[in-house]
């Protein structure tokens, strides 16, 4: 089933507002280098953990994005992933 992914850019001040449940070493640096943070509902729905990769289809073909952190967010049951 196709999934909608929403991406956003944010500064370090916004990142500090997220409570991380799990994280790889230096998750903010990893985020800036192209890894992703995912919400807890997204992680559960897609059976993902920190260190695994999220595979998505893009206009350039399938890409694999390492998960650097899982954060608390229950604003949507679908979950969130950012940035992409």
Image (cartoon, rainbow, N blue to C red):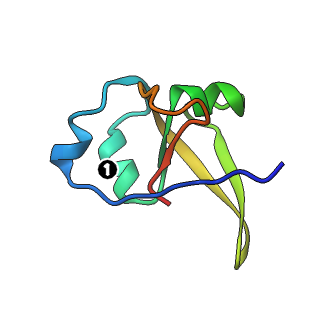
For the image, the number of numbered tags is 1
Residue beneath the point at 50% across and 60% down: 84
Q: Position of residue 56 (x, y in %)?
A: 71, 57
Residue at image position (19%, 48%) is 12
- Residue furthest to the right in view is 1
Tell me where residue 35 appears, x and y as whole percent: 48, 52
71 left or right, relative to 1: left
Query: Who's the residue at 52% across and 55% down the image?
Result: 6
Q: Position of residue 81 (x, y in %)?
A: 52, 46
Q: Nearer the viewer, residue 36 or 10?
A: 10
Say which element carries label 1. helix
Q: Residue furthest bottom?
A: 60
Say few, some or many: other residues with alpha carbon within 10 Å of mark 1 (under 14 / 14 to 19 / 20 or more): few
Q: x and y percent of residue 63 in the render?
A: 69, 63
71, 32: nearer the viewer: 71
Horizontally, residue 84 falls left or right of residue 16, namely right
Residue 64, image quadrant: bottom right
Horizontal side of residue 2 vs 24, given as left or right: right
From this viewpoint, which residue is outermost toward the front?
76
Residue located at (66% from left, 47% from top): 54
Q: Is residue 81 visible?
A: yes
Q: Is residue 49 visible?
A: no
Residue ID for mark 1: 29
Rendered image quadrant of residue 77: top right
């Amino acid at each position: 089933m196709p999934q909608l992914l929403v991406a956003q850019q944010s500064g370090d001040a916004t990142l500090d507002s997220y409570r991380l449940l799990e994280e790889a070493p230096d998750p903010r640096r990893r985020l800036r280098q192209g890894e992703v943070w995912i919400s807890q509902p997204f992680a559960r729905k897609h059976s993902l953990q920190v260190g695994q990769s999220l595979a998505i289809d893009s206009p350039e073909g399938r890409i694999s994005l390492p998960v650097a952190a899982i954060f608390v967010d229950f604003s949507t049951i679908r979950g969130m992933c950012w940035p992409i």
